[in-house]
Image (cartoon, rainbow, N blue to C red):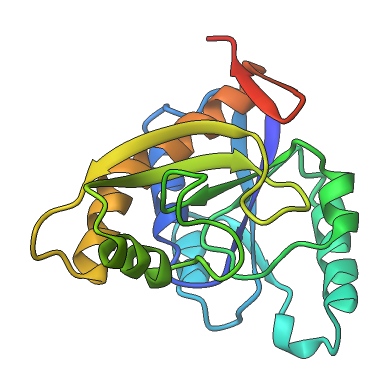
Amino acid sequence: MLNIVVLVSGAGTNLQALLDAEEAGIIRGGRIIHVISSNPEAYALERANRHGLCSSVVNRKAFLTADEFDSELLKALESCEADLVVLAGFMCILGERIIQRYANRIINVHPSLIPAFCGKGFYGLHVHQAVLSYGVKLTGATVHFVNEIPDGGAIILQKAVEVYKGDTPETLQLRVMRQAEWKILPRAVSLFCEGKITVKDNLAVIND
């Protein structure tokens, strides 16, 4: 049984999707053991508490440099004996030391169909605003491994979502979460924990 540590910064809706999936038996081969927040006020911490999960805070604002923050976060991950690190609305860029320490063991969910609308500056409502401004008819979500390039790691799963006439960034964000993010993130976590993902040359192959 692999140890899953979830990193959060805000409301924790993707964390909730993971917790619900675990309770429903959708996640096999792993268990969520700890939640770490970069924000002491994150509602995700309350979600963790309600499920009886251990949680801790590594407050990004408490550190003068990203390197100091990375050092403390790395200590926290190692103390948890994390086998898989899941970024669920984590609003901090991980440093090279953490990425190398957990190479192909960190996954993130991004609210677009990578390689569209991704990379530096594309997060949260900014992604959905860009989708609407460009006028695309399909968007979606992607679960991918994390490497040194923002949103550049091997793609594990994707799911498309239709863009409706009259959508706002907020309505589109909610539809993408409900129809895509909350479905493919637990699925990807389960595939990893079951040992069904192989990565070679930045391509993820699912052996399901």
Given residues 87 and 12, the one toward you in this image is: 87
Q: Position of residue 104 (x, y in %)?
A: 75, 36
Given residues 40 and 104, the one toward you in this image is: 104
Q: Residue visible at 15% across and 64% down?
A: 167
Q: Residue visible at 77% across and 89% down?
A: 62
| Location of the N terminus (image quadrant) | top right
Given residues 66 and 53, the one toward you in this image is: 66
Q: Position of residue 195 (x, y in %)?
A: 67, 18
Relative placement, left or right, of 98 versus 192 is right
Quadrant in which residue 35 is drawn: bottom right
Whether residue 118 is visible: yes
Relative placement, left or right, of 33 versus 76 is left
Q: Position of residue 2 (x, y in %)?
A: 70, 31
Total marks in image: 0
Whether residue 79 is visible: no
Q: Residue visible at 44% across and 61% down?
A: 50
Is residue 31 placed above or below 170 in the rendered structure?
above
Quadrant in which residue 75 is drawn: bottom right
Q: Position of residue 172 (x, y in %)?
A: 23, 60
Given residues 208 and 139, the one toward you in this image is: 139
Q: Residue visible at 67% across and 41% down?
A: 153
